[in-house]
Each structure stands twice: as structure tokens, then as C-alpha cells.
Image (tube, rainbow, N blue to C red):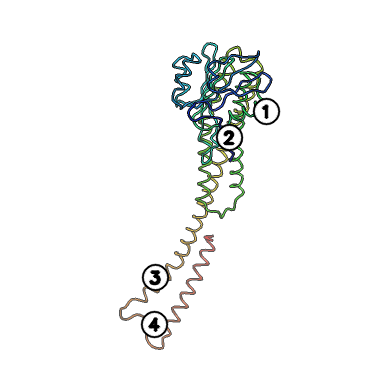
Amino acid sequence: MNETVPTDESDEALPLLFGRVLDGKGGGRPIGWADVPHWQPAQPGEVLWVHLLRTHEGVQQWLQDCLRIPEPTAELLTSDATRPRAFRDGNTLVATLRGINFNPGAEPEDMLSMQLWSDGRRIVTLRRMPLQTPRMTCNEVDAGTGPVDVGSLITSLTEHLIDRMSHSIIDMNEAIDELEEGDPEDDTDAVLSKIATIRRNCLGLKRHMSPQHEALLAIANNAPDWFEDHDRREIAETIDRLRRYLDDLDISKESALVLQDDIRARAAASTERTQNMLTIVAGIFLPLSFITGLLGINVGDIPLTSPGSHGFWIIVGLCFVLFALELLIAKKLKWF
């Protein structure tokens, strides 16, 4: 599914991709990198959200110095360890989540990671490659219809990550339907290659998204108290949706496997029919070849070769009789 990758509001010299101060009413205002370290809520309910490029030099040190994040946690937030996980660290929540890569030229099973840290009034998200999910939530904030607190911001990010997974599943199901309805005379190798790609995508998504199910469960069950009950209910809905998508992946994988087996069985049956026909033809012409070969040897005393014996026409007639007899026997034996 091709979509336009949003443009980050970033200065290449800074790690900040964008920053927003949520006003607690669904809206928010931009904040610059220089103002982030000294930010304090101007109104009750305000929340700071910064989205960073985690590969930028100095990000780990900034997390430790400005947010007082312990070194092991800061190292995890900026590392290439992208397996989904989530855990509570005191009054903070730390998570690594994955989303599908919709960047040009990417395959569905190519996953992108997003690290997340929050203490209830500040939230930091980090990514390495362009990821559209944070921008979608940011656009909602700019439109005044976004999350109102940290808990709803986290649930919004997870919902967008999971919702976008459905696009790939729908595309794969449509591709399977097209292959099932395709012409049996289509290039078998090309069709099998497409099916193999679909199965590989299903396996890749299942392998990457199953740990995400555990990570979301950890958020729902172990998040700090600032993650309110309604946020837990919202993320529980997201978990149920992810479970359904994982079930759909299993169904898509099985459908692709059944289709693959069916195509291979048809190809094998067609090959077998061809081989049977060639065997029958060879069996019919073998006696005729033997007779013509025997009479064609260059030795003396070959019968029916004297002038006026009509040997040629006798042999031709004998071959026709033998040919008709062989056809009759093959028909009776139901060879064709």
C-alpha cells in the first residue's frame, strides 16, 4: 500500500524531529529543541511530547542528563534492539514497539521500531527510519482532535501502529483471492513465486508482531498509575484487534499453502497426463518401428523384395492392421 511519507519538522543538526505541548483538550502547540530541557507545564494538564531521531549523536547523553533516565534505559532507547517489549521502571514506562514499513520499496515484513519513554507528564518517542505513525497522531494534535494526556497519547500511537497492520493483511488476502480466481493456464512458476512471497510476508509479520502482543499486555497490566483505567480499556481493545490480525495472518498463510498445494497438484497431474500419452504413443509405435527396422537391414534374402511381389504394400497393410490392433487393445485397457 503506497502512501506519502510525511515530512518531519527537523533540523539535520538536531535530533528533534518534532515537538508538541499537549494542552489537555486534544490540541497542542509546537516547541523547539532549545525550550525542551527547561519546559514546565504552563497550565494544568499540559504534556510535553518530543519525537527524536535516536541515531543522532548525543541523544543517549541528552536522555541521561536532561530527563535523568538511567544509563541502561537510555542505552536501550537508542540501541538497535528492536524486539517489542515493555516494562515499568519506577514511575516511568519504557517500551519498544514495531510498525509496518510503508516507505517506498519496502516489503510488508520489513518492520520499523519506535522506542517510547514516559513519566506521566513527559513522553519521548524515538525512531531510526521514517515512521508515519507518530506523524499521524501529531496531525491529530495539530487539528485539535488528538490525545488529551500521556495515557491517551500512548494508546493513540499503539492504535495507529496496529491499524496500519490491517492494510497489509487486506492486500495479501486480495492477492490470494486474485490468484485463486486466476486462469489455470497462467505461468505456474510465476504464480508459485507470488504465493511464496505472500507466505514469507505472513511469516515475517507473525514473527514480528507476536512479541508486540506481549508488549501491549505488559503496558495494560504493569503501567504506572498515571496510565488510567480508560487508557487500559483502550489498549485492551487494541490488543484484541492485534490478536484478530494475528489470527487473520494464520488464515492467510494456510490459504496460501492450500492454493500452493492445489497448483502443484494440478501441475503434477498435467505432467503425468503428458507422460502417459507419450508412453502410449511410444508403446504403439514400438512394434511398428521394430518391423520397419528389421526389414530395413542391409542383408540378403530379405523376403518380399523380389520384383512383382508387392512387398512394400504388403508391409504397409500389415503395419496398418497392427496399428489398428494396438489401438483396440489400448482402448480396451483404458489407456486413453
Q: Are marks 2 and 1 in contact (CB under 8 Å)?
A: no
Residue occupying the point 61% across, 29% down:
160
Closest to the camera, between mark 3 and mark 4, is 3
Task: First in sequence, mark 2 or 4: give its number.
Answer: 2
Where residue 129 sits: x, y (%)? 50, 32
Which residue matches tag 1?
Answer: 143
> Which mark identifies residue 304?
4
Which residue matches tag 2?
Answer: 6
Three-letter code, disc 3: Phe
Task: First in sequence, mark 1 or 3: give its number.
Answer: 1
Closest to the camera, between mark 1 and mark 3, is 1
Q: Pointer 2: residues within 10 angstroms few (<14), some, or many (20+)?
A: few
* Left or right side of 17 for 145: right
Closest to the camera, between mark 1 and mark 4, is 1
Three-letter code, disc 4: Leu
Q: Are marks 1 and 3 in contact (CB under 8 Å)?
A: no
Residue occupying the point 39% across, 70% down:
290
Task: First in sequence, mark 2 or 1: give its number.
Answer: 2
Where residue 2 sits: x, y (%)? 58, 41
SS of the residue under disc 3: helix
Q: Nearer the viewer, residue 29 or 262?
A: 29
Three-letter code, disc 2: Pro
